[in-house]
Amino acid sequence: MPHEIGLITTIAMAFGLAIVFGLAAARLKLPPLVGYLIAGVLIGPHTPGFVADMALAAQLAEIGVMLLMFGVGLHLSLDDLLAVRRIALPGAVVQIGAATVMGAAVAHFWGWSLGAGLVFGLALSVASTVVLLKALEARGLVDSMNGRIAVGWLVVEDLVMVLALVLLPPLAGLIKGDGGALSGGDLALTLGKTLGMVALFIALMLVVGKRVFPWILWQVARTGSRELFTLCVIAAALGIAFGAAALFGVSFALGAFFAGMVLRESELSHRAAEESLPLRDAFAVLFFVSVGMLFDPMMLVEEPLRVLAVVGIIVIGKSLAALAIVLLFRYPLNTALTVSASLAQIGEFSFILAGLGVALGLLPLEGQNLILAGAVISIALNPLVFSLIEPMLRWVRERSSLARALEQRDDPLAQLPMSTDQDLLTGHVLVVGYGRVGRRIGAALREQGIAVVVAEQNRETVEHLREDGIPAVSGDAADPAVLIQAHVARARLLVIAAPDAARARKMIETARMLNPGIEIVARTHSDEEAGLLQEDRPDRVFIDERELAIAMAEHVVSRCAWADKKTGH
């Protein structure tokens, strides 16, 4: 194969095998990404036949990570991240610590050094943002409260890993005991410089970037050229990501994420997300293929028990730690299970840490291979883990009074304050979900003097609502206890403003049982979800895109009628 066409050959083989095995996986009722991973194994160096260019594949995968993180930034605002900081920040730090201890303990049992155990544990502690995003997108959860918590959690993990990658080289000598470590003052200087550069980059993005880049996007859009608009979006994503890494030491992924956040301030952010979607999907496939290329199937034969231990830490150990942390913060079991499933895999940062550990002489090559094996297996299992959330949630709530008690135990936010005006709790409108849609609905109702009670999973939102004098209950409204606390039995109307069809069906069932005469209004993202909800006979289902089209059509018709009347036509 001529060197000049290495890139073309790698992309052609990756996409060709990915579509074949992805389709085969879908036919077998498996997630397509399992097929992508198998395609990567087949063109990797550990299997006979064609071997793709590993270096090129890794760079293509990095582009996929950047584009996906850019897409997340387009959907999440700084306010969305700040809204989950109380759970995401301490939760991610504690979970990283727990997973690192588990990994180090297993490494010590295998006779590895302290440094090897530290690197090994850190690599197992950080989940892949790419895998999480694909899982959330497949279930329509990116914009949900659970999705925002999971994404915020992983953003914190990524920031911690950036610090780890910077601090590991100067600490390597101290860990190995060979006298090559920096002094305490130098180490503090390195840490301070790193934190300062990251803070400077974030400040520039939020203060300057959110004004400059939306303006540039608007100027390009005014040309009317779709090609230039798409080019501007991709250039912003990759350019800011590269600049963040080259100038500030921030990872490509985090740089692209903040690029998306600043472009979200533009009124054209939805168009930017739509235009970049095909490229994001295509390069995401290359990411999974590149992960498969790193995997040596012989690890399953040579070290099956060690591979099983690694997968156990990733899928079970980390998940249980996250579950306990989220429940300790008094979030609903639904949220705890979603975050746990989100963390039950590892990916891009794990590979980088493992490679650095080997280069520094801290991690044995076997450790890197075990990390790669754990990544491939956990990524393949992750869709299955997500699919178990609802059955597990239903099973636990039906059979465990302890689980129900854990969600509601002595929680002042799980029930309305005793001081709540009882006149507000009869004939009120119960709004479930207080995001962008629920907030507007609530404001409109209050302007008309209509009593409103809110049920919301975000505890910080509930606290702010109560400070403003609005009755609110914290919890997952799919749990009957939450709707009971919100006095659904005496409400005249239930508004389900959170677009989650599976949970909405449970809310409708509970509301009908407790209040047969209640009127129910719900929203969904798609016709398919609306069809599911119609089986439970809500009074009205609003489909986001359809309602937007209807509103625009009504406006256009009314304007045309006004113009015809004015001109006498």
Image (cartoon, rainbow, N blue to C red):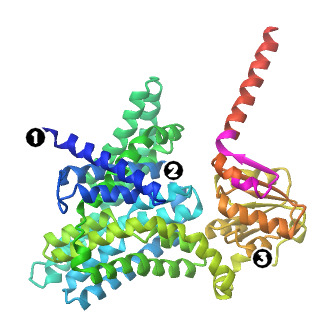
Q: Is residue 383 magenta?
A: no
Q: Is residue 450 above or below residue 99?
A: above
Quadrant where the C terminus sits is top right
Q: Which residue is mark 2?
A: 75
Of all residues shown, which one is farthest toward the top?
568
Q: Which residue is mark 3?
A: 417
Residue 73 percent coordinates (x, y): 46, 51
* In-front residue for pair 160/468: 160
Q: CA distance from mark 2 to mark 1?
A: 42 Å
Report crowding for label 1: few under 14, some 14 to 19, many 20 or more residues within 10 A (C-alpha): few
Residue 492 percent coordinates (x, y): 88, 60
Between disc 2 and disc 1, the foreground one is 1
Disc 2 + disc 1, Cβ < 8 Å: no
Which stretch did the figure color magenta?
532-546
The residue sitting at 45% across, 37% down in the picture is 275
Amino acid carrying label 3: it is Pro
User: Is residue 554 something that shows in the picture?
Assistant: yes
Residue 42 percent coordinates (x, y): 25, 57
Disc 2 + disc 3, Cβ < 8 Å: no
Residue 185 percent coordinates (x, y): 20, 76
The residue sitting at 90% across, 66% down in the picture is 426
Tell me if 248 is positioned left or right of 481 in this view. left
| Count of numbered marks | 3
Amino acid carrying label 2: it is His
- SS at mark 3? loop
Q: Is residue 544 magenta?
A: yes
Report crowding for label 3: few under 14, some 14 to 19, many 20 or more residues within 10 A (C-alpha): few
Q: In terms of sequence position, does the residue under pointer 2 or pointer 1 come before the other?
A: 1
Q: Which residue is mark 1?
A: 2
Tell me if 417 is positioned left or right of 392 in this view. right
* In-front residue for pair 367/153: 367
Q: Is residue 10 above or below residue 489?
A: above
